Image: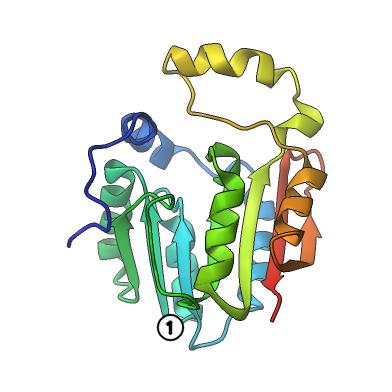
Amino acid sequence: MTDLTMKKPSAEARFWDKVADRYAQKPVADEASYRTKLWLTQTNFAPETKILEFGCGTGSTALEHAPHVRHVLATDISERMIEIARAKQRSTGVDNVTFSRADIADFEAPDGSFDAILGLNVLHLLKDRNGIIDKVHRMLTPGGLFVTSTACLADTMAWFGLFAPAGRLAGLIPHVEMIKARELERDIETRGFKIDHRWKPDKGVSLFLIARRKR
């Protein structure tokens, strides 16, 4: 299968390639919350729904959603993550998911290509978050959904911002943006979306949002 971007892997891609196998073996930190997010998302799907998921990691969420929709295009910057996702797909026999290596910053699709776009546990890792939100808006159909779950570390772990640059230089962590929940909601709302659902699990750092592109 041809990947959507074949540029030389970035430093971020190399980081995720390095940790992919270890990442794939880790259990979901909060299984109950994960299942709730899946259910909340799937209540908005229809058999003809076309999905883009960027930052799909090892593909578990794309495969969970596949039985409820027409097709899922799932992308990640890490080649190794995509290799693991494709192996999972072969073991499950799911045939309506396409896994491809791509950087959402470079990814292009015609306007209105997707009914739903998922960016889960990824917005806080992007250097140009608002540029990507604008791109998502353009690629969605009118009334289409943008589903996100984002670590809003500035609300509860502001100290992390003091150590993150050193950790990144040492290759221990990827690029991380310190985001506040209200700031993220504002960024999404001012770029042509109406937030239909917001949820932050008790004691969690991630804000889960289902936002709808305004017609």
Q: Position of residue 49 (x, y in %)?
A: 50, 82
The quarter in which the C terminus is drawn is bottom right
Q: Position of residue 165 (x, y in %)?
A: 56, 16
**Which residue position is annotated with label 1?**
70
Q: Is residue 152 above or below residue 99?
A: above
Q: Is residue 210 above or below residue 155?
A: below
Which amino acid type is marked by label 1? Arg
Depth order, front residue of 61/175: 175
Q: Is residue 73 above or below residue 119?
A: below
Depth order, front residue of 156/28: 156
Q: Is residue 60 above or below residue 43?
A: above
Point 75% across, 59% down: residue? 190
Report the label total.
1
The quarter in which the N terminus is drawn is bottom left
Residue 38 visible, this angle: no
Point 71% across, 76% down: residue? 214
Depth order, front residue of 67/55: 55
Residue 154 visible, this angle: yes
Q: Position of residue 34 (x, y in %)?
A: 63, 54
Classify mark 1: residues with Cα within 10 Å, few (<14), some (14-19) or many (20+). Answer: some
Depth order, front residue of 12/204: 12
Secondary structure beneath label 1 = loop
Point 33% across, 45% down: residue? 81
Q: Position of residue 189 (x, y in %)?
A: 76, 60
Relative to 97, is 184 on the left or the right?
A: right
Relative to 70, is 140 on the left or the right?
A: right
Query: Which corner quadrant of the image does residue 128 belong to?
Result: top right
Instruction: Give the colour scheme shown.
Output: rainbow
